Each structure stands twice: as C-alpha cells, then as structure tokens.
Image: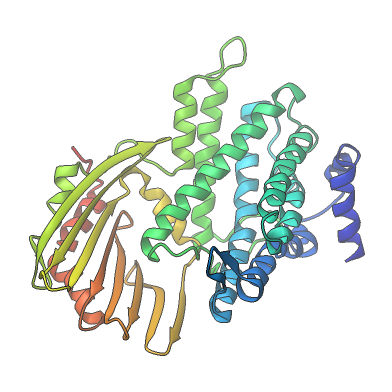
Amino acid sequence: MSKLIDRAQRILLAPKAEWPVIAAEPDTTGGIFKRYIVFLAAIGPIATFIRSTLIGYPVPFAGSFRVDFMDGLIVAILSYGLALGAVWVFAQIVNALAPTFGGQKDPLLALKAAAYAMTAAWIAGAANVIPFLGLAIMIAGSAYSVYLLYLGLPVTMKAPEDKAIGYTAVSVIIAVVLYWVTGMLVGLVIGGSMMMGGRWGSSIVDERGRFEEGSTLGKLEDWARNVEEAGKRVEQSEDARGVPSSDAIGKLLGAVAGSDTSVQPLSTGEIQAFMPAALAGLPRTALSSERSGALGVQVSEANAVYGDGRGRSLRLKLNDTGGAQGLVQLAAWAGVEQERSWDGGYERDYHQDGRMLHERWDNASGSGEFGMVVGGRFAIQVAGQAANMDELKSAVTAGVDVAKLESIASAGKSGG
C-alpha cells in the first residue's frame, strides 16, 4: 500500500519526472490492475455510497434525501465494475489512436497511460462526500487527469510532442462520447436507471491484455480493432500539413460508436407503424416520433400513450438504434444482471433467449414497467397500470410486432 501511495503522490506532484519511470518499469496488465487500479477506482464509488446513504443530498425546504442502504450498495458495486471496465476501454482507445498521431502501439503502455493519468480524477472522487464544493473538486481532478495524459502520451506511446495536444483531445472526446452513448443505450434496457455496471462474465484478462476468443469481452476487442482500422485511415488522409480529412475523422467517430452507415434507423413514419392503435384493451390517445443523429450515431424513437379516460394508462416507447446497433451489443458486454425486492415489489434486469430484459413492479401502486431489446437493435418499453407483470409482458408481445422487428434487425434493413 505504501508503494501505491508513493506512486500516486509522485504522478500528481512530479508528473514530468515520474512518467519516464512508469514507462520504463516492467509490469503486466494484471499487475497494474491488482496493485493500482482496483484500489484507486474504488474511491469514487465508496464516497458516493457514503454520501447517498449516510449523509444524503440536500433538498430545498425539505431537509436531506438519502437512498436505501441496499440501493446505495448496489449502485456502488455496479459503479465500481464500470470504473474498472472504463479504464480498460480508455486504454484501448489510446492504443488504437497511437499511429494516427505518430505514436507507437503498445497495449501495456497504453494501459499505463490511461491508469496513471486517471489518478487525479479517481482521488478527486473522494470529494463527493463534501456538499457544495465536491462537484468543483471532482471537475478540477478530471481536468488535471487530462493534463497528466497530455504529459504522459509522448513518453508512453512515443507520440511527438507537437501532436500530444491533438492526441489527448481526441482520446478524451472519443471516451466521453462512447461512455455517454453506451450509457444512453443501456438506460433503454434498465428503465433509465444509472446502474450500468454488472458482471464481467467468465472472461479473464491474460498478461497480454487480451480476452478469450468468443467471450463477451472478446467482442470489445473486435470493436477496438475496428477503431484501429479507422485510425489508420485518418493517418492516411493527412495532407501536407499533417491535418486529417473531416471525412476520415467522421468515420473514426462512427467506428467508435459502433455504427454501420449502411443501416439507418427507421423513418418517423415507419417506426410509428409499429405502435398499435390499442394496447392491452386501451385505445391510443397520443402518438409521436422523431429521428436524430450526431457523431455518426443515428437513432429514431416513437412514443404512444394509451388510456381509458378513467385514470388507467400505459406508455409505450420504441427506440431504433439503427446503424449504432453495434453499441447495443457493446453495452451487453457489461452483462447487466441484477435483482432486488422490497415489501410489495421487485426489480430485475436479466438475459433470456438472447435478449436483454428489464422488469419493475410495485404492488402498492399496481404499476410497473417491462422492457426488452429485440435483435440487438430495437428497445421496447411499456410502463403504467396493469393487473400484474404478465399483463405488461403480454402488452408488448401481443401488441407490438416483435417478430417483424427481429426480421428487420436480422436483415440489416435501412430506414427510409
């Protein structure tokens, strides 16, 4: 533990002197995780657990709001799992982009760059227990981590110093975009919950930083290779001044998002056609749809409300991730599975017949929600009053043409 503290102090206080030491010392992927990452990555989740369950969050004119102990513990555990996965994914991004900015690929050195640069952000996560000033401290810590990465990339990845700023900026932007989009898509499955961590599955990281072929995390490596190929095209597109083309940059961002430009989401009219005129015996009272995209990620969404005019209602939502369906499968690598219950209700996220499913039911209100991902592309969710969970499930399976959605996803059909 004393070595860990010494390393953290040196990288924070004397980074220019410490980066050459880090780059030169022998190590392994497993060693970096076991001796450094697993400890520092736990700081933020622990602080969040303490703040949410013991201290609470201030609510104007109402005192403090605290979450249930078990809820807080589940969020902390899942957040910790996500933090461990995030640093590995970030290392893959750093490694894949190295040739684009004149650097040399090396998965171990990329992990060093990602892990030790994250030191400031991880330690600043402890400030989450401090009301009011905590957020400012965490933002400052994240900013300092970006600076540490900027200093470390020329040393670890052998990137020319004049390209270090661009290398740092693109790495951070891509990581943020990936994290945000993946979180958004996972949220479709788990009902907007912030719990995005979960089981890593049976995959084991070997000393080369690779995962078993065919494992869930092996799919993540496939994604990384696609990013690498897109990065090479960015490098090849550079003009005499060393500036890459905007088209190549766009394709790189598309690769990061797991998008397939040949597959576009359904048009607003096409996706509305899947919203039935009646659901579970209730007539449709409202219908809307939209289609949008950014950074190579195109999605479309339809929403419908069903009611009897006497207080009972259901809300149906259908999302088409279109060409970004690769990200849905990337989200699946987290193996989101959780189950909890309370007096009169329960919530669970699980996999069944190749689909990700979400259930939540509360007996007191006689309401719940059910969601599923179909064909690794379409996310369906129904919520509202019902007799039981089976009625909500039946509303989806009987009211929505799931078979047709699966056939569209399988054929890779583009929208209009």
The foreground one among 399 and 71 is 71
Relative to residue 163, is residue 176 drawn left or right?
A: left
* Quarter of the figure with the N terminus: bottom right
Q: What kind of colouring is applied to the model shown?
A: rainbow
| Residue occupying the far top of the picture | 240
Relative to residue 133, is residue 78 drawn left or right?
A: left
Q: Percent position (x, y) of residue 333?
A: 49, 61
- Residue at 31% x, 39% y is 292
Q: Percent position (x, y) of residue 334?
A: 51, 63
Q: Is residue 107 visible?
A: no
Is 220 rendered above or below residue 350? Answer: above
- Residue at 46% x, 82% y is 340
- Residue at 29% x, 71% y is 370
Relative to residue 230, is residue 274 drawn left or right?
A: left
Question: Picture quarter containing residue 310?
Answer: bottom left
Question: Picture quarter containing residue 146?
Answer: top right
Is 380 rendered above or below residue 252? Answer: below
